């Protein structure tokens, strides 16, 4: 049981200042560290290790109340070798980037995977985020890719920072589940995936092909990389031209369109189902949390 007295009570302490600055991209890049907030993200981080076996979670700040409520998570964190600091609510509020902090804030090492390693694993389902600027959308698409059993996610150099606190929160722990390559030029991403035998499908509301028709024709069962574009203006023509097919999600009702994350979920699950039908089940189906 943790002590009833927090050891960190001043937002001005050097340790708190070092954590707080990770809310800014330039400091994240310099330190190669990022923030993971809330019990789900912290639990997933505690169980994650890099390719060299190094623990991803290096430090945890927790209020006394949160340390008691989530004693099992704090125990996992300590078991993983990370330092645990009991902190006042003011300190947690100062570090946190949320309006209502949940009392747990972890500091994690960067965990992105080199693009070459993604390719060498011969992926069958990949989500490529090209020109995605909203961190909440990026994190949600990553979560959808994880749920659909994708092998990897690629963020191009024109997309948002993977370690933006909002993106990390929106991934709801999925950031720690599958390889993610970052900063890859879209042309390099497409060329590398094509060379690895992956069909490139651009998702676009004005696409020439209809997703239902593609499924009926049986074109979705092979290795596939879905390319998703900007939330407001979609994919530029030069990116669409790189794809083997430009596919739209059909709108059967009166909705004007689907938002990025919803469209991504539909596309990724369509591929996952087609791949299971053609090559056997490829996904883990146990329930890990709310849908």
Image (cartoon, rainbow, N blue to C red):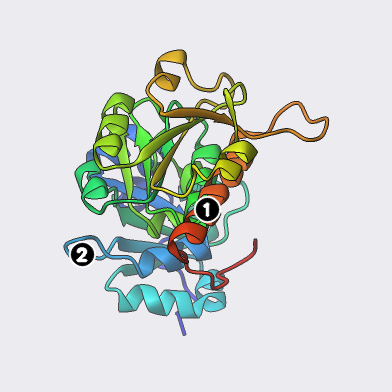
Q: Give residue 108's quadrant in the image.
A: bottom left
Q: Secondary structure at mark 2?
A: loop
Q: Which of 181 and 269 lies nearest the eye of the viewer? A: 269
Which residue corresponds to mark 2? 54
Residue 93 appears in the picture as rendered:
no
Q: Is disc 1 surrounded by few (<14), some (14 to 19) or many (20+) residues within 10 Å?
A: some
* Quarter the C terminus occupies: bottom right
Residue 152 appears in the picture as rendered:
yes
Q: Which of 77 and 153 lies nearest the eye of the viewer? A: 153
Q: Is residue 22 left or right of residue 217?
A: left
Q: Is residue 187 left or right of residue 222?
A: left
Q: Is residue 225 left or right of residue 247?
A: left
Q: Is residue 145 above or below residue 129?
A: below
* Residue depicted at x 29% and y 35%: 194
Q: Is disc 2 surrounded by few (<14), some (14 to 19) or many (20+) residues within 10 Å?
A: few
Picture coordinates of residue 74 (x, y %)? 43, 75
Picture coordinates of residue 21 (x, y %)? 36, 41
* Residue depicted at x 48% and y 50%: 145
Q: Nearer the viewer, mark 1 or mark 2?
A: 1
Q: Give residue 250's quadrant in the image.
A: top right
Number of on-image labels: 2
Q: Is residue 47 left or right of residue 263?
A: left
Q: Secondary structure at mark 1?
A: helix
Which residue corresponds to mark 1? 274
In the picture as drawn, the residue positioned furthest to the right comes out as: 254
């Amino acid at each position: 049981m943790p002590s009833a007295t927090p050891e960190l009570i001043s937002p001005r302490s050097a340790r708190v200042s070092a954590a707080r600055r990770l809310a800014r991209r330039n400091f994240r890049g310099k330190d190669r560290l990022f923030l993971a907030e809330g019990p789900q993200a912290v639990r997933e981080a505690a169980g994650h290790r890099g390719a060299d076996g190094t623990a991803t979670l290096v430090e945890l700040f927790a209020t006394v109340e949160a340390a008691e409520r989530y004693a099992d998570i704090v125990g996992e964190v300590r078991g993983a070798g990370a330092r645990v600091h009991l902190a006042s609510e003011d300190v947690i509020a100062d570090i946190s980037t949320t309006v209502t902090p949940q009392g747990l804030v972890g500091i994690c090492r960067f965990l992105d995977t080199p693009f070459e390693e993604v390719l060498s694993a011969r992926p069958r389902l990949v989500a490529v985020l090209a020109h995605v600027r909203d961190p909440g959308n990026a994190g949600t698409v990553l979560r959808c890719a994880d749920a659909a059993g994708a092998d990897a996610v690629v963020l191009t150099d024109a997309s948002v920072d993977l370690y933006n606190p909002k993106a990390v929160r929106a991934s709801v722990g999925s950031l720690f589940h599958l390889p993610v390559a970052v900063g890859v030029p879209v042309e390099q991403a497409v060329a590398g995936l094509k060379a690895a035998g992956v069909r490139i499908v651009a998702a676009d509301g004005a696409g020439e092909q209809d997703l239902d028709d593609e499924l009926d024709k049986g074109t979705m069962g092979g290795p596939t990389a879905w390319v998703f574009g900007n939330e407001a203006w979609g994919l530029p023509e030069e990116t669409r031209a790189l794809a083997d097919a430009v596919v739209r999600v059909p709108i059967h009702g009166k909705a004007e369109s689907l938002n990025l994350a919803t469209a991504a979920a539909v596309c990724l699950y369509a591929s996952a189902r087609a791949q299971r039908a053609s090559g056997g089940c490829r996904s883990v189906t146990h329930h890990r949390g709310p849908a």
